[in-house]
Amino acid sequence: MAWFNRKKAWTALLLIPGGLLGLSLTGAEAQKANFPDLTTAIAEVAQKAMPAVVHIEVTQRVQVPSPVFPFEGDPFFRFFFGTPPRPRIDPREVRGIGTGMIIDPEGHIVTNNHVVAGAAKIQVKMGSGEAFEAKIVGADPKTDLAVIKFQPPKNIPYLKFGDSDKLRVGEWVVAIGNPRGLEQTVTAGIISAKHRAGILDPSSYQDFIQTDAAINPGNSGGPLLSLWGEVIGVNAAIVSESGGFEGIGFAIPSNMAAAVAESLIKTGKVTRGWLGLSLQEVTPSLARSLNLKIPKGALVSDVTKGGPAEKAGIRRGDVIVSLDGVAVENANELRNRLAGTRPGKRVDIGLVRKGETLNAQAVVEAYLPSARAAALEIEGRLGMEVKEISVLEARKRRLSFRDGVLVARVDPQGPAARAGLEVGDIIYQINQQPLRGPKDYQRIVENLPPGQEVLLLVRDWRTGETGYLTVGVQ
């Protein structure tokens, strides 16, 4: 089936009793029927949107050791031959590129968190060629979104968010960005799927739009646009074995991006809704055991004592099938919807309990991670757990002071282990910031941007020597 012919006709197939009816509309007729003219739609979207899409160049200042021995970080080498001299530390500038989109006349730009994380300097270049310095307004690693701002000239172009919930699989979309530094590149494709999860960090909030519009390194943070010129996604990731485009790209839906951007602009942070529920997916076998007709909804595996859900009468084993009258497809969707709900709002919850349909009401509260959850998150950043240096430990090691933290556990597959850290080592500094104890460690590590290397001042437990090494942040 041809989408258009030489007479600029839009062709559709309508299902009617008895078969398929081919319907051809001219470009003018398509516009009257609220259809974009596909012979010109992509060019028109690109022409209108490109001035509001910016090229982002980020400069990071890192301090890295200049190695003096190739096996310096190898624990086996250190065991048999001792610790070689520690390397000197050299400053280095690392540059990265990405894309962003201007979303208001004040000069706010939405992009990906991974584009600007750890930036010492950010420069944005507009389609007109003008370049400006920008500052970070706020970032949200859990959705990989960030807002930066520059001081704009008068009457700057900007883009508007559309409603990503109304998207349909198969719709045409346009991506604009700077793949591999090639500025103002336009590609087109379709919506391949919706509600993709499990693409990035499992603890993040994921509800990706999948598209086959070409997305490559450098496209991150750029807009995915409908044929009406509205932003319906923020390009964020690809699945690729080659490192380049292979037909599978992912964008953060505009409804999520708009809510996060608004919160970051207003408060510099994102406050998420919480009911105190642990959720899991309803598998076909679980659906049969729970007397559900179809494997949809979110199964409650645990309820936080004293939380909003417990107060509303929700129990372990309930299956939540609707929220405010809208059906719940799966646990990931419910988690995202609750996170995006304003704290203080009363929500209606439809659930199934032992085959019986019930309703409950709960007041959403602001999410605050438990002490244990916060500790686990901090532990995962560098792949190790630390603790305070006790008086007994200080005497045992003949330490003159108890500043720093003691490495208590190392994930054998984590970045700390790869850097050569071992249980018993003492960390005195992170990025040249002194550590008086675990509270300093937690404060610094929780604010480290992922993907960056940090500089640690470490005392080796075997030799007692102190030196620097670098560890990647997860």
Image (cartoon, rainbow, N blue to C red):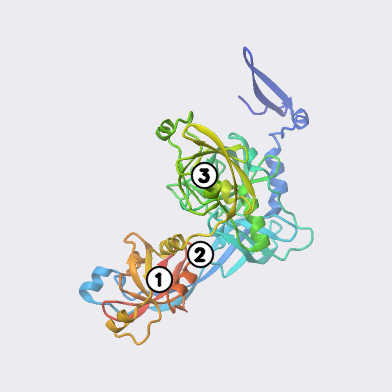
Give coordinates of residue 201: x percent, y percent: 46, 53
Residue at 58%, 35% in the rendered image: 169
* 184 or 117: nearer the viewer: 117
| Dots 1, 2 in contact, CB < 8 A | no
Q: Is residue 166 above or below residue 373?
A: above
- Residue 325: name its quadrant: top right
Left or right? Give the position of 143 relative to 5: left
Residue under pointer 2: 449
Amino acid marked by disc 2:
Pro
| Residue 314 marker | 3
Residue under pointer 1: 470
Crowding at mark 2 (Cα within 10 Å: few <14, some 14-19, many 20+): many
Spatial CA span between label 1 and label 2: 14 Å
Residue farthest left in this picture = 80
Give coordinates of residue 278: x percent, y percent: 47, 48
Q: Name the mark nearer the viewer: 1 or 2.
A: 2
Secondary structure of the residue carrying numbered label 2: loop
Q: Earlier in the sequence, mark 1 or mark 2?
A: 2
* 397 or 238: nearer the viewer: 397
